[in-house]
Amino acid sequence: MKNVNDLQVNGKVVLVRCDFNVPLKDGVIRDDNRIVQALPTIKELLSKGARVVLMSHLGKVKHKEAPEVVEAQKVKNNLAPVAKRLSELLAMDVKFCSVTRGDELKSMVSSLKNGEVLLVQNTRYEKGEEKNDPELSKEWASLCDAFVMDAFGSAHRAHASTYGVPEVLKAEGKQVAIGYLVEKEVKSLSKVVNCEDRPYIAILGGFKVSDKIKVINSLLKKCDKILIGGAMAYTFIKALGGNIGNSPCEEDQLDYAREMYASGKILLPEDTKCANDFDNPTETKIVDSKDIPVGFQGLDIGPKTMKKYEAEIAKAKTIFWNGPMGVFEKEAYQSGTIAVCKACAELKDAFTVIGGGDSAAACKQFGYADKFSHVSTGGGASLEMIENDGHLPGIDIIG
Ligand code: ADP
Ligand code: MG
């Protein structure tokens, strides 16, 4: 597979698919990590004298909704603030094309000079983006001489900008390559897809079992143990006959949970911190996870579980972590997630990977992000990479 480093692109228009799907509130970027992570590829291309055209999606635009709803979603997910932040980070003027198709875009691309950068409006403004529409792919491909895939967080989607465009360009004999971020992600995640250093411990939490069925199936084949926390633990506990009070539970996943548990690799929380209300609790207590009283719901793993999980983590040589252990957004239910962060951070000779948007946000919030070997920029993409044994459509198409 070609890397951006291998390209000869002096004076050429290079289209780079980035993942600038950053958290935005009222037009203000809350976390620019994904923009920062895209800089090495952009700088490499600028140093080669390329004319750089950047594309990304941002948020959701649901084209089936009423026109005024679609319009509001477009306003909310306007990519213009990213161009501004990129200008600051690159210390140069980054041009912005506010439309995704047509003459204005064509003329902005053709007037680019060597070493200039243009960011194109949110690819999801186009109805055909998520459908991988061939006409749209052709039009975008016609704008450029070469393509670089650096949107790891979008590599599990075969959309026009992640799949259709490189497919067209490859057929035309044009250069396509992966960028430095995709290279880094693949290198790190490969170590949790094909693990060589054992014990390999997976830590899974977060909200739903149903979101994580495929990854649990896959991890059971790959790892030595799976430590379960978060809301999804209660589905397992109920499946094994426990009383979970008012804790969240997916009734339609109970059989599946029993089947998975029979593997002997799954560890469940022994104790739970529960409360009598999610928003305004008047009583919180630590109870046996199999004995959560009616009227109470589990919101974090308890201290015994933390000790047990810390001891398991301490033995690991490889860790993959997805999903917080509790409602880490609230101070009262952060302890479990912090304990896991800390136990992973203390490992000396282990390879530790976080894949998951909320888990990555939690480890950053608690100050442990730089203690992990790798914090993926793609939550869904990293899970799908494990599920599909290292394959993602947006990366496979480059090779
Ligand atoms: P990730 O983004 O890392 O894959 P998820 O999106 O699956 O993680 O889950 C994160 C969410 O799960 C968080 O918002 C957290 O508050 C929630 N969560 C974790 N434990 C519980 C619980 N016991 N009850 C309710 N929500 C929980
Ligand atoms: Mg999430």
Image (spheres, rainbow, N blue to C red):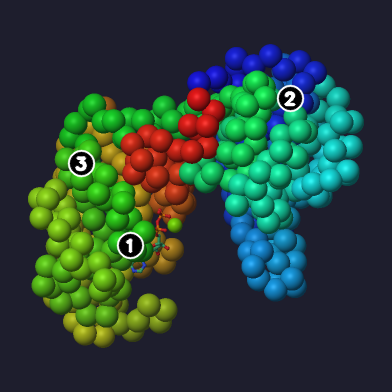
Disc 1 under 8 Å from ligand 1? The reply is: no
Question: Residue type at mark 1?
Answer: Ser
Q: Please tell me whether mark 3 sits on a helix, a strand or a loop.
A: helix
Q: Which residue in the protein does label 3 denote?
A: 221
Amino acid type indicated by mark 2 = Asp
Q: Is residue 356 visible?
A: yes
Q: Quadrant of residue 303?
A: bottom left
Quarter of the image holding residue 294?
bottom left
Q: Nearer the viewer, mark 1 or mark 2?
A: 2
Task: Give the CA distance from mark 3 to mark 1.
Answer: 18 Å
Q: Nearer the N terminus, badge 1 or badge 2?
A: 2
Mark 2 vs 3, N-terminal side: 2
Please tell me which residue is depicted at 19% across the width and 31% down the height of the picture: 198
Coordinates of residue 174 in the picture (x, y in percent): 67, 22
Secondary structure of residue under mark 2: loop
The amino acid pointed to by label 3 is Lys
Residue visible at 41% across and 67% down? 330
Q: Name the residue that disc number 2 marks.
A: 145
Ligand 2: give its quadrant. Answer: bottom left
Whole-angstrom CA distance, mark 1 to mark 2, is 42 Å
Which residue is found at the position 60% from the left and 33% from the top?
167
Q: Is residue 107 left or right of residue 43?
A: right
Q: Are marks 3 and 1 in contact (CB under 8 Å)?
A: no
Label 1 packing within 10 angstroms: few (<14), some (14-19), many (20+): few
Q: CA distance from mark 2 to mark 3?
A: 42 Å
Callout 1: SS = loop
Residue at horizontal 16%, vertical 52%? 266
- Whether residues under marks 1 and 2 lie with C-beta atoms below 8 angstroms apart, the answer is no
Residue named by callout 1: 210
